[in-house]
């Protein structure tokens, strides 16, 4: 392979890296009364799962905006997104089986108890 082609492919790969990496840091949550920056983590889901909780409500921040398809997929997994809060955050209702589901947890950047 020619050196110029290798250089071009290397630069292209570097440009694509930020697109391929998921957002790991939560964005600010904008409530009517205040704005706050949540810590990364799903500790609230862990505590609820350990407690054997029934259906619970949380503020959850997803790794991207949830369109209708995403909302339907989450609903099928036991998570109903109820009300949107700016910066990819939702008031969500979790069925007990959804609290520890890896497919659900992979989409959530942060969760906080309500």
Image: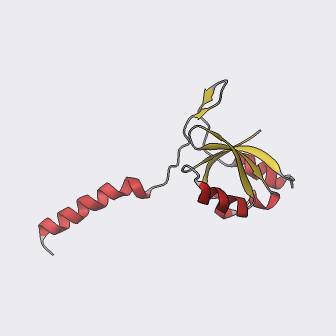
Query: Could you say where residue 104 lies in the image, as x and y percent from the top left?
Result: 67, 59
Residue visible at 84% across and 52% down in the picture? 55
Left or right for 38, reference 80: left
For the view shown, which residue lies furthest in the top direction? 33
Left or right of 15, for residue 61: right
Image quadrant assignment for residue 11: bottom left
Question: Is 30 drawn above or below residue 8 in the view shown?
Answer: above
Q: Residue furthest front?
A: 68
Give the quadrant of residue 8: bottom left
* Residue 45 position in % (x across, y down): 74, 50
Q: Residue at x 58, y 53 (%)?
A: 67
The quadrant of the picture occupied by the N terminus is bottom left
The residue depicted at 79 percent of the width and 62 percent of the height is 97
Q: How is the image coloured?
A: secondary structure
Extreme residue toward the bottom, this view: 1
71 or 38, nearer to the observer: 71
At 77% from the left and 38% from the top, the residue drawn is: 114
Tell me how many marks there are.
Answer: 0
Measuring from the top left, give residue 112's x and y in whole percent: 71, 41
């Amino acid at each position: 392979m020619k050196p110029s082609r290798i250089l071009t492919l290397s630069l292209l790969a570097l440009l694509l890296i930020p697109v391929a990496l998921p957002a790991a840091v939560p964005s600010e949550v904008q409530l009517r009364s205040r704005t706050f920056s949540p810590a990364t983590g799903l500790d609230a889901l862990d505590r609820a799962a350990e407690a054997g909780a029934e259906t619970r409500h949380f503020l959850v921040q997803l790794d991207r905006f949830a369109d209708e398809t995403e909302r339907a997929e989450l609903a099928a997994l036991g998570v109903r997104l109820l009300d949107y809060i700016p910066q990819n955050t939702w008031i969500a209702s979790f069925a007990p089986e959804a609290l520890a589901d890896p497919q659900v947890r992979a989409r959530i950047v942060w969760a906080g108890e309500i």
